[in-house]
């Protein structure tokens, strides 16, 4: 890591993903933009999950073990559904209405009670 990467927050992780996307993209083609959008779709949960963690006390370890387990499980399922909606695949390729429903279902599962 260079001198400019002192803080390893979400911005650092996303910038590292974009650097990998830039590295793997062919320099003479339009694959660079395709790889950027793919990395954004895959990293969208990195932006959203911390807000839900701060919003739900059970994800911070406050509350009964049953509440914490339910919050973690529904949060993981919600994040997986949201990522499946952004990526367009769950068990097969999803069309646009299915993708919208997957994203909405994922967000609703991540919202605390």
Image (cartoon, grey):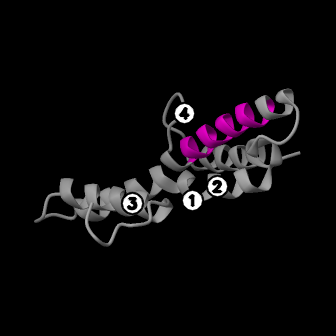
Spatial CA distance of label 4 from label 3 is 19 Å
Q: Position of residue 55 (x, y in %)?
A: 78, 55
Please give left or right for residue 99 compared with residue 93 in the image.
right
Task: Give SS at disc 3.
Answer: helix
Spatial CA distance of label 4 from label 1 is 21 Å
Residue at (74%, 43%) from the top-left corner?
59
Disc with the residue nearer the chain's start (4 vs 2): 2
Would you place residue 97 above or below residue 32 in this image? above
**Residue that badge 2 annotates:** 50
Residue placed most toward the observer, 8 or 103: 8
Please say if the residues under marks 2 and 1 sit with CB atoms less than 8 Å apart. yes
Disc with the residue nearer the chain's start (3 vs 2): 3
Q: Nearer the viewer, mark 3 or mark 2?
A: 2
Q: Position of residue 35 (x, y in %)?
A: 31, 56
**Residue that badge 3 annotates:** 37
Q: Quadrant of the C terminus?
A: top right
Residue placed most toward the observer, 77 or 31: 77
**Residue that badge 1 annotates:** 47
Q: Residues within 10 Å of mark 1 (few under 14, many from 20)?
A: few
Please give left or right for residue 68 compared with residue 21 in the image.
right
Q: Residue furthest bottom?
A: 4
Would you place residue 87 above or below residue 20 in this image? above
Q: Which residues fall within the magenta stretch?
A: 70-85
Residue at (65%, 43%) from the top-left corner?
102
Please give left or right for residue 13 compared with residue 106 in the image.
left
Spatial CA distance of label 1 from label 3 is 15 Å
Circle on res. 90: 4
């Amino acid at each position: 890591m260079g001198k400019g990467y002192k803080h390893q927050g979400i911005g650092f992780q996303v910038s590292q993903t974009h650097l990998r996307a830039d590295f793997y993209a062919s320099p003479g083609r339009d694959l660079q933009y395709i790889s950027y959008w793919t990395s954004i779709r895959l990293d969208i949960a990195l932006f959203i999950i911390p807000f839900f963690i701060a919003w739900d006390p059970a994800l911070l370890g406050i509350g009964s073990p049953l509440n914490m387990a339910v919050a973690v499980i529904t949060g993981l399922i919600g994040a997986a559904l949201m990522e499946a909606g952004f990526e367009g695949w769950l068990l097969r390729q999803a069309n646009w209405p299915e993708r919208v429903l997957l994203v909405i279902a994922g967000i609703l599962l991540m919202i605390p009670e």
